[in-house]
Amino acid sequence: MTLTTSEIWTVIAGLGLGTFLIRFSFLGLVGDRPLPGWLLRLLRYTPVAVLPGLVAPLVLWPQATGGAPDPARLTAAVATVGIGLATRNMLLAIVGGALTLYAMLWLLG
């Protein structure tokens, strides 16, 4: 399917307008009023939900292996989660996961 230049720019403009309206709904319409407590509690979980959504495809379908699951990356992901749960330290979990990945890539070749 080939899109013309005008169709591509229409899609870009539509996505830009949609993004603006989503942000404006919080900042422009509600920005000067306090948010309800239940909504503030739910918004605390947004980063926790977004980060796995960004990382999971890189672990389960890595481009380096042509989309096939890789024992080195799976081991590093498990190590990262384990270190994070054990220490409650995000930076230590990231460093531990990176070191595990490099060690597993070196061991497995």
Image (cartoon, rainbow, N blue to C red):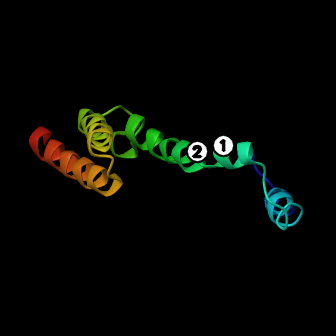
Q: Which residue is drawn at the image coordinates 78% and 49% (left, top)? A: 36
User: Whole-percent x and y of residue 43?
Assistant: 65, 48
Count of marks, rendered view: 2
Front residue of this view, candidates 65 and 5? 65
* 67 over 23 or under it: above or below: above
User: Whole-percent x and y of residue 29?
Assistant: 89, 62
| Amino acid type, label 2 | Tyr
Q: Which residue is drawn at the image coordinates 23% and 46% (left, top)? A: 101
The N terminus sits in image quarter: top right
Callout 1: helix, strand or loop? helix
**Which quadrant of the view contains residue 87?**
top left
Whether residue 103 is visible = yes
Whether residue 12 is visible = no
Q: Disc number at residue 42?
A: 1
| Amino acid type, label 1 | Leu
Front residue of this view, candidates 6 and 71? 71
Q: Which residue is drawn at the image coordinates 85% and 60% (left, top)? A: 30
Contact between marks 2 and 1 (CB within 8 A): the answer is: yes
Extreme residue in the left direction: 107
| Residues packed near mark 1 inside 10 Å, few (<14), some (14 to 19) or many (20 plus) | few
Q: Which residue is drawn at the image coordinates 26% and 47% (left, top)? A: 97
Q: Disc number at residue 5?
A: none
Q: CA distance from mark 2 to mark 1?
A: 6 Å
Left or right: where 81 falls relative to 58: left
| Residues packed near mark 2 inside 10 Å, few (<14), some (14 to 19) or many (20 plus) | few
Residue where numbered disc 2 is placed: 45
Left or right: where 33 falls relative to 88: right
User: Whole-percent x and y of residue 61?
Assistant: 42, 36
**Which quadrant of the view contains residue 108?**
top left
